[in-house]
């Protein structure tokens, strides 16, 4: 049986995706956890994985000029669309590895070198297997690395007979988010009751809709602004999106984070933990 | 002076800092480079004077001229073209607009057309000029739109850039060629972890930086210890306060209600200039 995938996303950053995901990791059984936020991953700080396997991620290339062969004709600079060549020096940060400069160079002085853009890890945690990664600082191709993380998770799920994969998604709605939600069974949006949170949730819902992925919403810190929470519930209601949970604000979540533990484990009797347990119960009905 | 406000971790208060700082300065332009989820305009409520579509170039293959040799798809580093025996498929959202396919095509069968990826909006509120980008939903690549927002930069103004979260290419595009970067973090393990990665990006880029700790009083002291050890100046602490959080939730920049903070932002700028 193919494992079902849930992606936790938010649009806006810092709404509590990782805190929620870590708690779901504790509550769910036979689950592979992934961290699809490959350029600022935090889930490992709570799940404390023991890395079993490390893979080099070589997706990008960077152009290198051989100064001895270069005749300084300037054609490479003229054709580079990324502004990465200035006075015949290639800026590896701006270079997107397209290969146009190497193609256009009349004396074959430019080569493309593969570079390691990051690492993917397969790990075990006390809550189940985990697939995660780390993109090198400033790199591109985060979407491709997310795809690798999800492929690894699927392999592990098959091997370990897991029925579920929970993906902790990145913020935004661009490339790595698209790679995190493509083809998943459901998207769970964690929203905070602020005007920015609502604005970004609407765009995240738009993205899930665009890819025809069933969406569910959970309001985090709902009591910080109950008026905005009502607006979220109303908006979801009129768009046919179920609100599966409302989590209260409590500084104990930060305490749990400092202790390096998922909140439902750190303080199982807290209001927050009970709300997350209820959220999970409601979510399970749709799986 | 061009100052970028960045963070690594999302939701630490970049937009809060960028907007409140812009409101504290004179003759200022605010560029919101978080084109996936722009929020500055929600706090600033500008009157929008102008909206411009932004395009990126994608290939168009002439089926008449094409002989399906496959050189374009072999060349494309982004898998944006697929050549079958009797057809060519283009995947525009994967295309980086490098122009390589048109160059390598031996039959000159490839031309480029413009495809809209988003829009930039320009407006003004409370003496602040704002430019922000909105990436179309479903569009993967933010960088061309970020560049379009930055192209609107006016050289006679102080510039504040609100950067997207993360530490990948969108951050690099936003912070590229800026004079100084303010990193907004929160005193938690997540805040610290992502701050460290962002500091590495800025060091690689050679951009000077300082830190603002938001929600000070929550969490622990490790961010402070880290900044001290790395000699990164602590520019400001914004306390964890229900009032500030509540103002934010309603979309009100806190300097509007707590004007004493304007001087603190001006002080930061003086410190940076020194």
Image (cartoon, grey):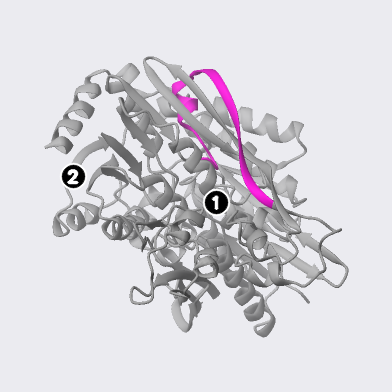
Circle 2 residues within 10 Å: few <14, some 14–19, many ≥20: some
Asked if B140 appears above or below B217 in the picture, the reply is below
Q: CA distance from mark 2 to mark 1?
A: 38 Å
Q: Is residue A96 left or right of residue B104?
A: left
Q: Tell which subunit mark 2 falls on.
A: B
Residue that label 1 marks:
A274
- The answer to if B24 sits in the magenta stretch is no
Asked if B175 appears above or below A133 in the picture, the reply is above
Viewer-proximal residue among A52 and A151: A151
Q: Which quadrant of the figure has residue B237?
A: top left
Circle 1 residues within 10 Å: few <14, some 14–19, many ≥20: some
Viewer-proximal residue among A243 and B258: B258
Viewer-proximal residue among A40 and A136: A136
- Residue B234: mark in rendering: 2
Q: Measuring 38% from the left and 24% from the top, which residue is drawn there?
A: B253
Q: Is residue B50 left or right of residue B189?
A: right
Q: Is residue A53 left or right of residue A160?
A: left
Asked if B250 appears above or below A258 in the picture, the reply is above
Query: Over which residues does the magenta segment extend?
Result: B35-58
| Image location of residue A148, percent across then percent down | 59, 72
Q: Is residue B89 left or right of residue B96?
A: right
Q: Measuring 15% from the left and 31% from the top, which residue is drawn there?
A: B270
Q: Measuring 40% from the left and 52% from the top, which residue is drawn there?
A: B172
- The answer to if B57 sits in the magenta stretch is yes
| Image location of residue A8, percent across then percent down | 60, 55
Q: In the picture, which quadrant includes the C terminus of chain A? A: bottom right
| Image location of residue B163, percent across then percent down | 41, 42
Q: In the picture, which quadrant includes the N terminus of chain A? A: bottom right
User: Is residue A220 shown to the viewer in this render?
Assistant: no
User: Is residue B7 shown to the viewer in this render?
Assistant: yes
Q: Are marks 2 and 1 on the same chain?
A: no
Circles 2, 1 touching at the beta carbon (< 8 Å): no
């Amino acid at each position: 049986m193919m494992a079902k995938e849930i992606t936790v996303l938010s649009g806006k950053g810092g709404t509590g995706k990782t805190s929620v995901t870590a708690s779901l990791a504790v509550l769910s059984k036979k689950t592979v956890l992934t961290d699809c936020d490959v350029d600022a991953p935090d889930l490992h700080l709570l799940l404390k994985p023991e890395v079993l396997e490390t893979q080099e991620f070589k997706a990008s290339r960077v152009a290198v000029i051989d100064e001895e062969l270069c005749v300084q004709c300037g054609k490479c600079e003229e054709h580079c669309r990324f502004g990465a060549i200035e006075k015949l020096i290639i800026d590896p940060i701006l270079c997107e590895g397209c290969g146009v400069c190497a193609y256009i160079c009349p004396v074959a002085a430019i080569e493309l070198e593969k570079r390691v853009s990051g690492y993917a890890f397969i790990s075990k945690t006390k809550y189940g297997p985990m697939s995660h990664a780390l993109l090198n600082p400033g790199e591109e191709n985060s979407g491709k690395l997310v795809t690798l993380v999800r492929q690894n998770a699927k392999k592990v799920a098959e091997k370990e007979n897991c029925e579920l994969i929970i993906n902790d998604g990145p913020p935004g709605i661009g490339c790595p988010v698209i790679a995190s939600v493509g083809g998943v069974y459901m998207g769970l949006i964690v929203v905070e009751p602020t005007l920015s949170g609502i604005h970004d949730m609407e765009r995240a819902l738009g993205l899930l809709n665009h890819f025809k992925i069933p969406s569910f919403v959970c309001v985090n810190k709902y009591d910080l602004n109950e008026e905005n929470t009502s607006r979220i519930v109303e908006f979801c209601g009129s768009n046919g999106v179920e609100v599966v949970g409302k989590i209260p604000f409590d500084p104990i979540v930060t305490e749990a984070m400092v202790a390096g533990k998922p909140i439902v484990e750190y303080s199982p009797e807290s209001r927050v933990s009970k709300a997350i347990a209820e959220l999970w119960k409601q979510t399970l009905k749709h799986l | 002076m061009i100052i970028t406000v960045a963070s690594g971790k999302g939701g630490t208060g970049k937009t809060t800092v960028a907007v409140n700082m812009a409101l504290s300065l004179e003759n200022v332009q605010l560029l919101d480079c978080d084109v996936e989820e722009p929020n500055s305009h929600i706090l600033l409520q500008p009157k929008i004077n102008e909206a411009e579509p932004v395009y990126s170039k994608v290939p168009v293959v002439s089926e008449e001229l094409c002989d399906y040799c496959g050189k374009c798809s072999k060349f494309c580093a982004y898998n944006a073209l697929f050549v079958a025996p009797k057809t060519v498929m283009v995947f525009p959202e994967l295309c980086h607009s490098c122009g390589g396919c048109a160059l390598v095509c031996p039959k000159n069968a490839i031309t480029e057309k413009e495809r809209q990826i988003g829009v930039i909006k320009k407006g003004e509120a409370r003496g602040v000029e704002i430019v922000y980008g909105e990436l179309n939903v479903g569009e993967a690549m933010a960088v061309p739109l970020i560049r379009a927002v930055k192209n609107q930069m006016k050289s006679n103004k102080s510039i504040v850039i609100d950067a997207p979260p993360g530490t990948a290419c969108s951050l690099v595009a936003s912070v590229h060629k800026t004079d100084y970067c303010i990193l907004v973090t929160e005193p938690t393990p997540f805040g610290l972890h992502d701050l460290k990665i962002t500091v590495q990006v800025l060091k690689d880029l050679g951009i000077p930086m300082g830190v603002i700790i938001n929600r000070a009083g929550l969490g622990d002291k490790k961010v402070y210890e880290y900044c001290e050890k790395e000699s990164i100046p602590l520019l400001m602490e914004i306390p964890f306060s229900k009032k500030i959080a509540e103002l934010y939730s309603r979309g009100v920049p806190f300097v509007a209600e707590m004007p004493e903070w304007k001087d603190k932002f001006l002080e930061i700028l003086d410190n940076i200039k020194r």
